Image: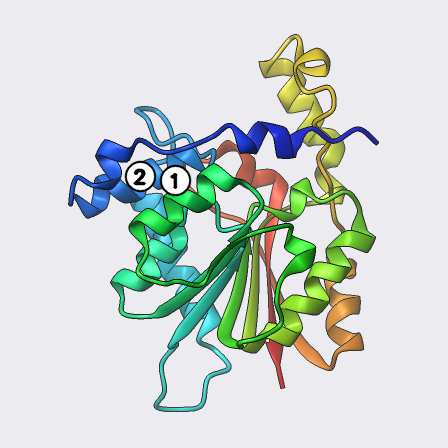
Amino acid sequence: MENNWKGLWAGRSADGAVLHSGDARQIFLELKRSNGFDVVEGGIPYESLMNQYWEMKQRLSRPLPEGTALQSVYEVGCGSGANLFLFENDGLCTGGIDYSPKLASCAKQVLRTADIRCDEASQLPESPQYDAVISLGVFSYFLDEAYAEIVLEKMASKASYAIGILDIPDVAKREDYYAYRKRLIPDFETRYQGLPRQFYSKSFFETFAQKHNMDVEIYPMTMENYWNSKFNFDCYLYKR
């Protein structure tokens, strides 16, 4: 199957003037914009993005020993580093990998960590370990489930406690998703030729968790003013 997503992401970048402005809120929004999220007027509100972050942080912390807090987070498909930017501002150690040289360069401009790698998700280094390993909105760009499982295996090795995979396209809602997109975009087939979207069943992640003796929690994705959320779900995997 033709897949041109890598070429598309290779051309995206963030506004350097904003990244060096010193305004944390505007930096975060610009990082999110460069990662493909619509944060302009009428798009996803800043508050919705922050609510997603706080919810994610809380869920990632669930398996930690009593009296301890999340100390480190690594992101697969970190893009320009928007999510890691929030974690670092909360005092956590971070790291990430992304296959877009321009976006990885943006991440290096705004993050304190030196652990930013430009490479395919399948080349994720399994060490050093981090408390949690996350991936937001990235699994939809993988070629197939076999590739996704390779990445999951490496995420499981790299995580000390938890894995968070958010914004996962639900295969049970695939037809509704395409019907909705085609209503909005009359030339959808032409515009998105060579840009496939990978959908997943919840059982894919449940089977992986069972195979690796992990607990799994799956939630419907909820984000105000993000049209895609009604077609997606979030998954958290916890080491026992």
**Mark 2 and mark 1 in contact (Cβ < 8 Å)?**
yes
**Percent position (x, y) of residue 26?**
23, 39
Number of the label disc, if any, that sits on residue 32? 1
Given the current orientation, which residue lies at the most extreme left position? Answer: 22
User: Dividing the picture into quarters, in which one does residue 162 lie?
Assistant: bottom right
Is 100 displayed left or right of 73 in the figure? right
Q: Regarding mark 1 in the picture, which secondary structure is present there?
A: helix
In the displayed structure, 52 sits above or below 228; it is below
Q: Residue at x 41, y 73 (%)?
A: 72
**Percent position (x, y) of residue 61?**
44, 75
Could you tell me the amino acid type at mark 2? Leu
Could you tell me the amino acid type at mark 1? Lys
In the displayed structure, 65 sits above or below 39; it is below
Number of the label disc, if any, that sits on residue 139? none
Q: Residues within 10 Å of mark 1 (few under 14, many from 20)?
A: many
Residue 216 visible in this rendered orientation of the protein:
no
Q: Residue at x 68, y 78 (%)?
A: 214
* Distance Cα–Cα, label 1 vs label 2: 5 Å
Is 182 displayed left or right of 23 in the figure? right
Q: Nearer the viewer, residue 19 or 144?
A: 19
**Percent position (x, y) of residue 19?**
26, 40
Q: Nearer the viewer, residue 173 or 69?
A: 69
User: Dividing the picture into quarters, in which one does residue 193 lie?
Assistant: top right
* Location of mark 2 (residue): 29
Q: Regarding mark 2 in the picture, which secondary structure is present there?
A: helix
Q: Nearer the viewer, residue 2 or 209?
A: 2
